[in-house]
Amino acid sequence: MSKAPKYTFRVVEKRNKTWTAEIQRQATSKKKVVSKRQTGFASEAEGVVWAENELKQVLANHVARNKRHDDDRAEQYKDKLKKAELAAAKASLEADEQAEETVESEQSFTLSEAEQEKAISDLQELEQLETDDAEEELASKSDKLKFDFELVLEEEELAAKEASSKVKTKSETKVKTSIEDSSVEEVDESETADGAEVNSIYLQNK
């Protein structure tokens, strides 16, 4: 299958007896676009000479542009290839590091019998220390609570003693008063034992 050239030219005669030269670009399989045009040639030969020179220049520019594009694509390909290589190297390095960490982790769990016994002993000692600390803290809190409780009891006991003392004092005062009253009545009775009626009459007359 033959491929039509990208650029061509043609020279056509106009009504005013002049010639026009055009550089055409094949845009699609059925469509051509005029890239350059020059009018006013006196003869077809002049138009052809101009068109051939311009076509050479256009083709040279096209080749140079394609080369630049090829170089750019090659550079982009190199960049992509370099990035892919870096990504692969990074992935490989991460895989190696992960493998090393796994080996180190496995080795860290592979302890000798003596190391295992020491680790168990250290763990038990740590647990015992934590238990002792918890018991000391609980005992300290209990002592404090006990002290507060005893203080409340002492205050209540003191208040009860004061109240009892007041009641006792009041009772003693009442008893003492009652005894004094009884003594007075006995004196009166002794004084009027022989003449109570006389004294009573005496007091009434008086």
Image (tube, grey):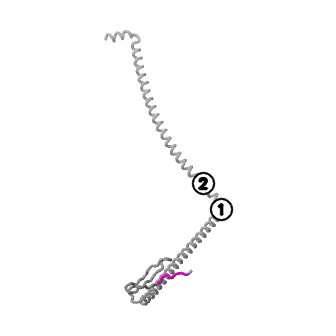
Asked if the residue at tag 2 contacts the one at tag 1, i.e. Cβ–Cβ closer than 8 Å, the answer is: no
Q: Position of residue 70 (x, y in %)?
A: 51, 80
Q: Position of residue 139 (x, y in %)?
A: 55, 47
Secondary structure beneath dot 1 equals helix
Q: Say which residue label 2 marks.
A: 127
Q: Say which residue label 1 marks.
A: 115
Q: Which mark is residue 123?
A: none
Q: Earlier in the sequence, mark 1 or mark 2?
A: 1
- State which quarter of the image contains the C terminus: top left
| The one of 163 and 94 positioned closer to us in this rendering | 94
Give the quarter of the image for residue 38: bottom left
- Residue 190 belongs to magenta span: no
Label 2 amino acid? Glu
Label 1 amino acid? Glu
Q: Image height check: is 19 above or below 194?
A: below
Dot 2: within a 10 Å radius of its alpha carbon, few (fewer than 14), some, or many (20 or more) residues?
few
Q: Position of residue 167 (x, y in %)?
A: 44, 29
Residue at 40% from the left image edge and 10% from the top image edge: 194
Q: What's drawn in magenta, residue-wise?
A: 2-8
State left or right for residue 1 relative to residue 200.
right
Residue at 41% from the left image edge and 14% from the top image edge: 189
